[in-house]
Amino acid sequence: MIAVLAVTACAAVIVLSRQWPFSENRIAKSLQETFPATVTFQKFRPTYFPHPGCVAEGIVFRRLGMPAQTPAIVTIQHMKIEGHYLDILFRPGYLAQIVAENFQVHVPALGTKVESTGWKATSPTSVSEKFFSTAQCLRSRGLILPIPCGSIFRS
């Protein structure tokens, strides 16, 4: 009986490690399927306990179809994504919470050319709660506008 449990536990660890939904590549792919941008991380680490998820730092979204010298459209200093083990099994693509700190949206100058990319949102991911702290909108002329996080971004 103990041997069966040990083999089952080992098999579960192997399957989860190969199919872990919170790997850097899977999170980047999901974000790129949700937003028309390429996404990079300076630091990334998965978390396992008490909840499955990940922590990313230095997240940069670069808008598709923009010239290479254009600043990133969004930067996030720190982001924590959290799920539940039962959701991984019974509701794949469902996240309990995303918390983003120092979220900045960079608005390009009026008239900035954006090439058509043919991008369409394809991500099946849904999120229960989203929290953004210290959110700012940076306009091309250096004007910083605080974004009222509590009223706009919570769902």
Image (spheres, rainbow, N blue to C red):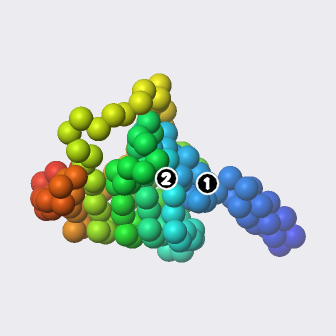
Q: Secondary structure at mark 2?
A: strand
Q: Residue at x 59, y 51 (%)?
A: 26
As drawn, the label of residue 39 is: 2
Q: Which of the two discs, 1 and 2, labels the residue nearer the N terminus?
A: 1
Visible residue check, residue 10: yes
Classify residue 95 as left or right of residue 149. right
Residues at circles 1 and 2 in contact by the CB criterion of under 8 Å: no
Classify residue 31 as left or right of residue 88. left
Q: Amino acid at mark 1?
A: Asn
Visible residue check, residue 54: no
Judged by depth in the image, the label closer to the viewer, 1 or 2, is: 2
Crowdedness near tag 1: few (<14), some (14–19) or many (≥20) residues, C-alpha within 10 Å: few
In the rendered view, tell whether residue 92 sits above or below residue 105: above
Q: Secondary structure at mark 1?
A: helix
Q: Amino acid at mark 2?
A: Val
Residue nearest the observer in this picture, 130 or 64: 64
Residue 153 x, y percent position in the rendering: 22, 53
Q: Look at mark 1 in the image and give the residue it sits on.
A: 25
Classify residue 105 as left or right of residue 30. left
In the rendered view, tell whether residue 51 sits above or below residue 152: below
